[in-house]
Amino acid sequence: MNKLIFRKLSLDILSFFLLSSIALTSIVWVIQGVNLLDIVTERGHAINVYLIFTILNLPKIFSKLLIFSYFLTLFVVLIKYEENNEILVFWTNGIKKITFINFIAKLSILFLIIQLFLSLFLVPQSQNLAQKYLKNSSMDFFPKLIEEKKFSNVMRNLTVFVEERNDNGELKGIYIKEQLGDEEYKIIIANTGMLIQDSEGFKFKLKKGKITNIDKKSSFNLGFNETSYNLSKLTAKTRKYVKINETQSLILISCLSKNFNKRKDKEFRCVEANSFLLKDIYEETFKRFINPIYIVIISLVSSLVILKTKSNILQNYYKFFLFILGFIVILFSELSHKLLISEIYLEIFSLLLPVIFIIFFYLYILIKSKFNLRYL
């Protein structure tokens, strides 16, 4: 009988978690998708590129919201059980409160494993794939971003201005400025032209104009009747470097383990001069390994709901207090990595704090539930 009762509780928790996490993830994903529309409107990438890029961001969003979704799930489900007197089914069947809370804590281990898998493997991999896909994708909408009487800066180090553009794609009054280096520019002015696409990419076919090369010392002018300006050698504004949250966990761990004594150095970089700061690697590794442990803590906080009886006139305030407490724990879990670069005692404190929280809340629950060792 007890197994059936706990099975129903598990199903209620899992079903509510799926609904809440999907709803929250979808809302954030849509909002983020709107903010990422500049991939199409300003960078010239195709709609399918935009869709795949945003879909690859889903694991990151889900991972960020998992701890809050789980806390919300436990809080809502346990309050529902308590208010509908469904919680009495456990007590009347001889199930002790500490046994009930132990079950919730054990269930949280499943979500801890899921969060670790997401933060250590899936999220960095999906973020890296998203950026690579965007970087290597073509700019199919580039021609549509060249508007009349408007300076366009779709590509890196390139400015294009067109005086007039007709329905056939013919351009008039063309101005192209390319930055070649530090204070070095190439300026092309043409009366007419066309933007065409071949196997190599986009290029301007220009007629009747001149090319001016400018550097620090001098300038050089060259007239032409017809010329081509190839855009394939230029790059889009898409970021080319890899961020630390897109880097595999094993790479970060390897770097940190080899240089652990320099983990607080604000200038030391791992292996290469253009790689990540070691202190940033330390913080990122902390977030991937330690933050998920707070899932167990918020499960214990949520379990405190069952330790109050309905006869308590402060019951509603108590529930509100627990919700705020859980929210503060979640907020602190996101900020605790900032203590790592502080004094050594604060660093150790931040590393041990999840374990301290678990012990503290569990001991409090044991005392309040008047536990017996044989129920542990």
Image (tube, helix red, strand yellow):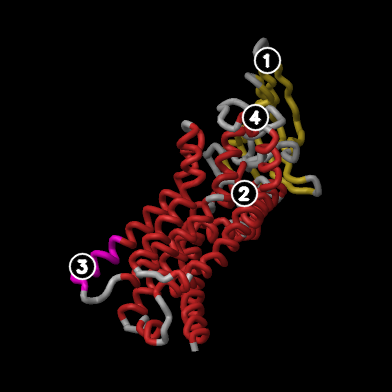
Label 2 element class: loop
Q: Nearer the viewer, residue 167 or 292?
A: 292
Q: Which region of the structure is painted magenta? A: 312-321
Q: Nearer the viewer, mark 1 or mark 3?
A: 3
Check the image and report above or below for 35 versus 340.
below
Disc number at residue 33? none
Q: In terms of secondary structure, where does tag 1 sit?
A: strand
Q: Disc 1 residue type? A: Ser
- Give the residue number, with chain letter if any, for mark 1: 219
**Which one is earlier in the sequence, the residue at label 4 or at label 1?**
1
- State which quadrant residue 365 falls in: bottom left
Q: Callout 4, which amino acid? A: Arg
- Residue pointed to by mark 2: 44
Residue at position x 45%, y 56% from top? 359
Q: Please provide percent x and percent y for residue 84.
A: 32, 83
Q: Provide residue 228's location: percent of width, then percent of height.
A: 76, 36
Q: Secondary structure at mark 3?
A: loop
1 or 3: tag closer to the N-terminus: 1
Front of the two marks 4 and 3: 3
What's the CA distance linking mark 4 and mark 3?
A: 54 Å
Q: Which mark is residue 314?
A: 3
Residues at discs 2 and 1 in contact (Cβ within 8 Å): no
Image coords of residue 323 (percent x, y): 34, 62
In the image, is residue 336 above or below residue 1? Answer: above
